[in-house]
Amino acid sequence: MNKKGDTSTLSFVGSLIISAFVVIALIALIYLILPREDTENTDLTTFYFKAMAKNLKEIKNDLTLTFLPDEDYALVSFSKNINSISVLEDKCGKAKISNTISRPSSCQGSCLCLCTADSSLFSAGSDLIINCNDEEALCESFNYDILGDESCSYFLYYSKEDKPKEFSAAKLQDKIIIKAK
């Protein structure tokens, strides 16, 4: 028997097993370190947005709506007569934003949009950046203006919480007033 050959084969197999464990440990470590995409919550947010838009299109009188916020999105409505939102009022929906929110080109007339929101520096005291012209943004057109108050020309809602939020909606002649509960 060749003991030298058996020892080197055994040594080679042992180092292969140890190398496999090291590779698996490194992959697991990389998986833990790299941020994961929250696609499940984003899909739910899109689902709730579409359900909200559908219910608002069918509104007769008063309605309670549910929306699942996501820190990467903001709800924004544009009335027929505005092209951008830059000065925010509490009653219309207020968030500390650093940019003017421009009406997306896909928004004809009055619309409700699920716009992207960059909140990466929001918790550090910086302002929120909302973009309704991003390719991820969704908009639904309406025959009625969707407003945060009768005296508003828009509605804005943003939250970092990932719990369902209820809104009340009321149809008043040619507009829909929507408020967070």
Image: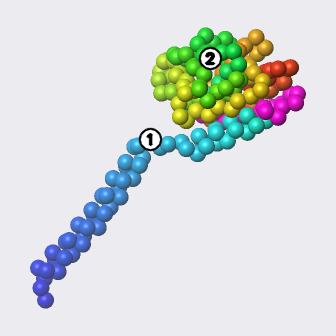
Q: Pinpoint residue 122: horizontal percent, then vertical percent.
A: 51, 22
Question: Relative to residue 129, is residue 42 depicted above or below?
Answer: below
Membership of 117 in magenta stretch: no
* Residue beneath the point at 74% across and 23% down: 146
Residue 83's label in the rendered image is 2
Which residues are drawn in magenta? 56-71
Question: Where does the image place residue 174, in percent across and percent down from the top left?
Answer: 82, 20
How dense is the environment of label 1, judged by Cα within 10 Å: few (below 14), some, or many (20 and up)?
A: few
Q: Report the quarter where the C terminus lies.
A: top right
Q: Quadrant of residue 153?
A: top right
Q: Which residue is pictured at 75% across the width and 21% down the height?
A: 145
Instruction: Report if residue 65 lies within the magenta region.
Output: yes
* Residue type of the residue flagged with mark 1: Pro
> Is 155 or 90 nearer to us in this picture?
155
The residue lying toward the viewer, choosing from 173 and 128, is 173
Give the number of the disc on residue 156: none
Q: Earlier in the sequence, mark 2 or mark 1?
A: 1
